[in-house]
């Protein structure tokens, strides 16, 4: 990938592919998933609906991708994880995109009126919490000012988008889960000293795939 990976050409490519439904789907996601994920790729009828927002915006002319690190309440299966802003659908949400925008506004104070939605990635089932997540990609023309929902969000991470295209950005690391179970050789994105794994890493995998 060229140095322009995070520039307007990249945004044009992903917008075109997202709006045209030209997605690699689970084949691109599973590259960053643990081998156990191969047994849980299909959502059951009981799965709960959720949405997340992969938000792209410039910082000093370089496009970044927004992540959050969640707080770590006792017993929270996703506590402390790095993820995109998002959460479960509410009855008042108009649709899955509305859920993603509402959650981003609630969790980190994103002005939803300023977000241009580029499209939706392939929905991803998360077995541990029984959520079927709809990932949306959005664009802001400027770096946002954050207001954190302190009960949910410990910090925000603004990571250079182009860094996810580097040849040495993926590492295999063991991961200890909330219940003490250790997963061996889990794929991680390693960007700016941050380790991103699990469902979020899989969504990023598809985002990277459509930008190549």
Image (cartoon, rainbow, N blue to C red):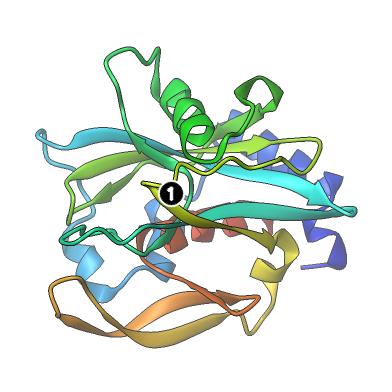
The residue at the point 14 percent across, 80 percent down is 181
The residue at the point 42 percent across, 40 percent down is 86
**Quarter of the figure that contains the C terminus:** bottom right
**Quarter of the figure that contains the N terminus:** bottom right
Q: On screen, 203 above or below 123?
A: below
For the image shown, how many numbered marks are present on the structure? 1
Tell me the crowding category of disc 1: few under 14, some 14 to 19, or many 20 or more residues within 10 angstroms, Cα based: some
Q: On screen, 204 above or below 20?
A: below
Q: In this view, does 183 lie to the left or right of 59?
A: left
In front here: 18 or 90?
A: 90
Residue 171 lies, in percent from the top left, at 49, 85
Q: On screen, 110 above or below 112?
A: below
Q: On screen, 201 above or below 109?
A: below
Q: In this view, does 58 lie to the left or right of 148?
A: right
Q: In this view, does 132 lie to the left or right of 180?
A: right
Q: Quadrant of residue 40?
A: bottom left
Q: Quadrant of residue 182?
A: bottom left
The residue at the point 60 percent across, 80 percent down is 193
Q: Quadrant of residue 163?
A: bottom right
Residue 201 lies, in percent from the top left, at 45, 63
Farthest residue, direction front? 150
Residue 72 lies, in percent from the top left, at 30, 62
Q: In this view, does 1 lie to the left or right of 157?
A: right
Secondary structure beneath label 1: loop
In front here: 196 or 27?
A: 196
Residue 108 lies, in percent from the top left, at 54, 41
The residue at the point 18 percent across, 62 percent down is 74
- Residue at which label 1 appears: 25
């Amino acid at each position: 990938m060229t140095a322009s990976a995070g520039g307007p050409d990249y945004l044009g490519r992903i917008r075109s592919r997202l709006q045209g439904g030209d997605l690699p789907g689970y084949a691109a996601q599973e590259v960053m998933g643990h081998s156990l994920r191969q047994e849980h790729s299909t959502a059951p009828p009981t799965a709960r609906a959720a949405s997340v927002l992969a938000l792209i915006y410039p910082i000093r002319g370089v496009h970044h991708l927004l992540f959050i690190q969640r707080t770590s309440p006792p017993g929270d299966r996703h506590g402390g994880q790095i993820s995109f802003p998002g959460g479960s659908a509410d009855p008042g949400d108009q649709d899955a995109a509305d859920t993603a925008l509402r959650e981003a506004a609630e969790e980190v104070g994103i002005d939803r009126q300023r977000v241009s939605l580029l499209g939706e990635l392939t929905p991803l089932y998360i077995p541990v919490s029984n959520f079927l997540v709809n990932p949306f990609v959005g664009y802001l023309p400027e770096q946002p000012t954050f207001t954190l929902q302190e009960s949910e969000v410990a910090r925000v991470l603004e990571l250079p988008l182009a860094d996810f295209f580097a040849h040495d950005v993926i590492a295999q690391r063991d991961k200890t889960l909330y219940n003490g179970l250790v997963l061996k050789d889990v794929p991680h994105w390693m960007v700016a000293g941050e380790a991103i794994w699990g469902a979020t890493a899989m969504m990023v995998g598809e985002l990277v795939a459509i930008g190549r």
